[in-house]
Amino acid sequence: MSSLFFYEYYYILIFLIFSVLISFVIFALSFLLANQNPDTEKLSSYECGFDPYEDARNTFDVRFYLVAILFIIFDLETVFFFPWAISLANLSSWGFWAMVDFVFELALGFFYAWKIGALEWE
């Protein structure tokens, strides 16, 4: 019974080992083959379009945070579409209409953010 249990996950273990090896090979090749020309501009930190050498107490536009939050919200909500689309044939009408309600509320949130100008950039 125990060997049968591990046999089911054998392919996942092979996939994980293969993906880690490929990741290390790609990282090593990109490090070895890349043109290494560091200068002060490349090595300086960059955050949100502001010069990193100014005073840390400068005012910061809240739209950076708003755009990031909106991106996370809409990005995570669209992840719910994949399992729904895969199991759509097996869902009852309640599952279908629950997702239609979800899409409607998602669209309402998008239009509200658009209406208040959260997506406008100056």
Image (spheres, rainbow, N blue to C red):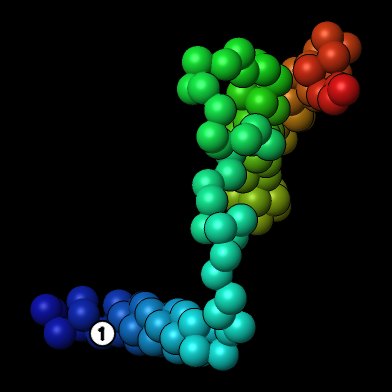
Can the viewer see residue 23? yes
Q: Is residue 43 left or right of residue 24?
A: right
Q: Nearer the viewer, residue 21 or 75?
A: 21
- Residue 111, position in %: x, y? 85, 18
Give the residue at x 21% y 76%: 5
User: For the residue carrying disc 1, how many other residues have a C-alpha within 10 Å: few (<14), some (14-19), or many (20+)?
Assistant: few
What residue is pinned by disc 1?
A: 7
Q: Quadrant of the C terminus?
A: top right
Q: Residue at x 65, y 33 (%)?
A: 50
Q: How far across and down, in percent of the image, does residue 103 sit?
A: 75, 29
The percent coordinates of residue 92 (x first, y second) are 65, 38
Identify whether 52 is placed above or below 119. Answer: below
User: Could you tell me which secondary element the residue under label 1 belongs to?
Assistant: helix
What amino acid is found at the position of numbered circle 1 in the picture? Tyr
The quadrant holding residue 60 is top right
Is there any visible trace of residue 94 in the rendered image?
no
Q: Residue 35, located in which quarter of the rendered image?
A: bottom right
20 on left or right of 100: left
Give the image location of residue 48, x and y in percent: 64, 35
